[in-house]
Amino acid sequence: MGSWMFIGIFVSLMVVWAIVNATRFGWDPYPFILLNLFLSMLAGLQGAILLIAAKRQDAISAALAQHDFETDAAAKDEIEELMAINRRQLTLIQLLISDRPPEARR
């Protein structure tokens, strides 16, 4: 229902309906009450379809957000682990430098 092809076919069918029913042999004379009934039913169905699609999109967005959160949390843990390793390395380097004789520090 959201494509240009659907819109073109739908408008064409409405124009054909109006032309055929404007003649003497039409089954739904002007003001096309039966056509209005069909259009109202279609509008009701489209509303339901749009709500279903919005609900599905919300579920997809929630799943993506959850995945992003889990990825960020895992990355945070890994970064904290790397920073702890880096701090230990700096401590070891400082210990190595302080154990060397003064002439070797230059």
Image (cartoon, grey):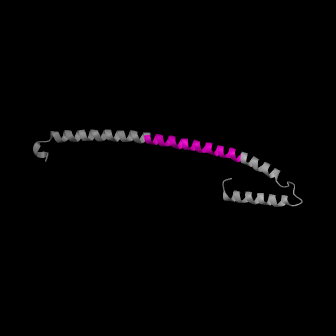
* Magenta residue check for 49: yes
Q: Is residue 71 left or right of residue 104?
A: right
Residue at the limit of the structure toward the right, as seen here: 25
Instruction: Give left or right: position of 67 versus 8.
Output: left
User: Considering only vertical position in the picture, is 33 above or below 55?
Assistant: below
The x, y position of residue 54, in whole percent, is 62, 44
**The magenta stretch spans residue 69:** yes
Taking the spot 20% from the left edge, 40% from the top edge, the residue there is 94
- Is residue 62 depicted above or below 16 in this figure? above
Residue 85 lies in quadrant? top left
Q: Main secondary structure of the magenta part?
A: helix
Image position, residue 28 (x, y; %): 85, 54
Residue placed at 69% from the left, 59% from the top?
5
Nearest the camera: 60 or 18? 18
Percent x, y for residue 72?
44, 42
- Above or below, 29 relative to 92: below
Farthest residue in the left direction? 103
Identify which residue, 62 or 87, lies in the foreground.
Answer: 62
Q: Percent from the top left, x then y, of residue 38?
A: 78, 49
Magenta part of the chain: 45-72
Which quadrant holds residue 84?
top left
Does residue 21 lie above or below 97 as drawn? Answer: below
